[in-house]
Image (tube, rainbow, N blue to C red):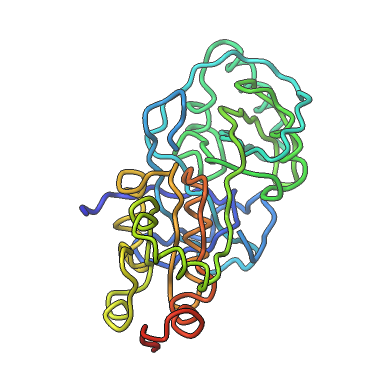
Amino acid sequence: MSRLPTASSSFFLQRIRLPAISSLIVSASRPPSPFRSSSSQPQLSFSPRLRYSPVSPPTSSSFLTWAAPPVVGTPRLRTKVCYCAGSSGRENKELLVQHLLVGEDNLKLLLELQQRISGGVDLSDLAVEYSVCPSKENGGMLGWIRRGQTVPEFEEAAFSAPLNKITRCKTKYGWHLLQVLSEREESVLQDVEPEELHLKMQDPSFIEEVQLIDVREPEEVAQASLPGFKVLPLHQFGTWGSLITDEFDPEKDTYVLCHHGVRSLQIAKWLQTQGFKRVFNISGGIHAYAIKADPSVPTY
């Protein structure tokens, strides 16, 4: 694969930790995230295929964990403006959200920006110019979010906002103007036990019908491997991350493997943010597979 340039990330979403690839490190001196810290973590029907830029977490600032790389090259959507709270509960939904953020002392600026949006200026254009969130580099695009990923005030505003309407909310990080561009059913992320995977792999059609990804390094794969898995080394994430939806179909079941199941879980969660609907993490990795399911596979 050819190496593509990557964009700076938003540190609004926070459910996934990606490898600290030196070329992708983002400075932790940026403004804090309005999204809760946590140790855990598309193709759109109305647009061409969108490509997400891979990101990695900052090396300091302990309260930040990262997720949902921002969309690169997102079409600028021109939509009707309405300032309202909405009423939809949207249980089991994920939302595609863009926003802009200004400081809590800048309500006057926020009101001026609202007026400009009412006059026909696009929110994404204003995000580039005025937002203090790093997502400004991508027009304020946050990508797909689900419940539990954001601070309560932002979550309530986003999940009650009608599609394509502008909604205002305040969090401890400042004032937001947000817009929900699309919604979809929440994606599935499950662990699969090695014994179950082994049984499935006895059926040749299984390997043909699903997508199998091994995120271990080449030297690890040389020691032990499973048939049918495409090797995407985690340390080379900056090379293949932005091409993921070109190489794999988000609609297909996707299984992810590593040595012990930790790195694969990182990528499985990231795949969710890229629009993959059914992702399976192989519990315990290839080590557990060798111990529990197939002793012919070497351990290391």
On the image, the x and y values in percent for residue 245 come to 36, 44
How many numbered circles does the render carry?
0
Q: Residue at x 67, y 60 (%)?
A: 37
Q: Residue at x 65, y 38 (%)?
A: 93
On the image, the x and y values in percent for residue 128 come to 48, 33
**Nearest to the observer: residue 280 or residue 61:** 280
Q: Which image quadrant is residue 145 in?
A: top right
**Nearest to the observer: residue 91 or residue 236:** 91
**Nearest to the observer: residue 48 or residue 6:** 48
Q: Quadrant of the N terminus?
A: bottom left
Answer left or right for 186 relative to 86.
left
Q: Which image quadrant is residue 43 in?
A: top left
Q: Residue at x 53, y 12 (%)?
A: 120
Q: Residue furthest bottom?
A: 300
On the image, the x and y values in percent for residue 168 come to 71, 28
Up the image or down, 88 lies above or below 26; here it is above
On the image, the x and y values in percent for residue 3 come to 24, 54
Q: Quadrant of the C terminus?
A: bottom left
Up the image or down, 267 lies above or below 177; here it is below
Q: Residue at x 30, y 84 (%)?
A: 223
Q: Residue furthest left?
A: 2
Answer left or right for 261 relative to 54.
right
Up the image or down, 241 lies above or below 227; here it is above
Q: Residue furthest front?
A: 203
